Amino acid sequence: MKGTTVYLGIFFGLIVVSEAGNWDIYKNKISTTLELSPNELKTLSPVVNVLSAERIPNGLVKATVIMDKSIAASRNGQRLFRRGNSGNSSSKWIETAKKIKQEQERLQNRKIFLPGMNYSEFDFNTFHNLTEIYSFLQVVTMTFPEKTNLLMIGQSFEARKILALKIGNHSTAKEKKSILLHGAIHSREWITTATMLKLIDELLNNPENTDLLDDIDFYIIPVLNPDGYEYTWSTDRYWRKSRHIDPETGLDGVDLNRNFPTFWAPATNVTGPSSEVFPGFEPMSEIEIISLDRFIESLGKNLISYWDIHSYFQVIMYPIAAKCHVRGKHFKEHLKASSIFIHGVKEKNGAEFKQGTTCDLLYPASGTSFDHFYLERKVIYSFTVELFPKFDDTTNEFVVELDKIETATTDFISGFIPVARYLQVKIHSGFFDHI
Ligand SMILES: [Zn+2]
């Protein structure tokens, strides 16, 4: 009881501070009134300011709190708002909100990549917003004009560019093979974009990769879902889907990695338009997916490998994702390549990635990218990778601490490059000429 009194005293103390302060600091904030236990209120304290708190019956506290709009707009924030006055609060949301707040503080001191900066001034060990990433891609092409091309493969729902960087040495070979990779089909998975940017650096600046660029063109799309990515920076850090919003139908974004036509499944009642995994009202309804599919179709049979990068779980998955206990007819090759991947990761950083189909490792998933590109576009080596952290790392999950970025990106690169080398040997052996 004594503890409670002291604790409430702290919050009542805050009222004085708030009222004496400058209210302009609250212009990007929003308030709500909650009924919750003193301990719950204490847990909330890192992410909210308490404007008033009073004890009410049942041992609860009625508190008016104020928080950043960006936190309030998050899905969990909205849930908390809806529950305001109900006496419930979500401990999961509190943990998430704390993580977001801590990340915002970490990013305040990050090295922003500004127009006019050089390649060497780009910080690979922090996160960057879309403007910075697109500026950097321009700088890459100016720094390595003989090896790179920047391509716009399409536009997003909100008319942002979807950019692919092509990396490869000029070749006289008529049909040079290629590998395509992308990050951030799910916008909150920032580490995937950081990894794509680091891979660009690895391919261009590590001289050991020169011969890879002779034989293979790499197409790297750091942000496949630019609207969602932008939204995670401006409004809701945990936004996963596209920003295709339609109030008339209740559409609240589409899970782009459920919108591919292969094994597409209509949403059931359980997954209505506001669901995190809403697949769209029709297969291939989303412009981001149409853009990617058209681009991959244009690469034809020269595209030998496709990589859809996600976080988190530390796994490499091969087809078939939509059905359990079903493998693709190239299963042995999938197993071989993914074994090379997990061996490479382990050797470098010690991380233990797992391999298997999506059903083996997570759950069956319909309408996914790599089922589509494997079965319909005949890209034999099609994979989905879930990066750092492990499934039980509740400290990092989607919000990765800055000092973990290097390990996370190196994990992927040390698995991927050996697979690219394996495919290079396959190219030289004529393997792809007979398919
Ligand atoms: Zn994902």
Image: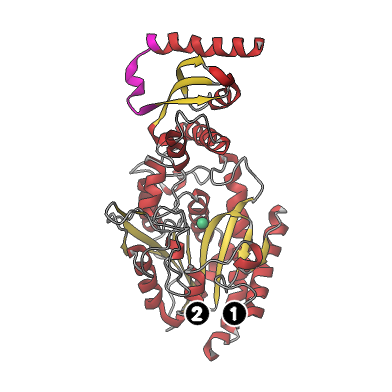
**Residue at the front extreme of this rendering:** 57
Residue for point 52% across, 89% down = 433
Lower position in the chain sequence, tag 2 or tag 1? 1
Residue 367 badge: none
Q: In this orientation, which residue lies closer to the viewer: 202 or 152? A: 152
Image coordinates of residue 145 in percent, x first then y, are 38, 62
Question: Along the line of sight, which residue is nearer the eye, 290 or 62?
Answer: 62
Name the residue: 54% across, 85% down: 432
Residue at disc 1, secondary structure: loop
Type of the residue with mark 1: Gly
Q: Is residue 94 above or below residue 17?
A: below
Magenta range:
19-31
Asked which quadrant contains residue 318, the reply is: bottom right
Is disc 1 surrounded by few (<14), some (14 to 19) or many (20+) residues within 10 Å? Answer: some
Q: Position of residue 263 (x, y in %)?
A: 48, 74
Q: Nearer the viewer, residue 293 or 46?
A: 46
Label 2 crowd bin: few (<14), some (14–19), many (20+), radius 10 Å:
some
The residue at which mark 1 appears reads as 328
Per the image, the residue denoted by label 2 is 375
Q: Position of residue 62 (x, y in %)?
A: 48, 20
Q: Are marks 2 and 1 in contact (CB under 8 Å)?
A: yes
Three-letter residue code for mark 2: Leu
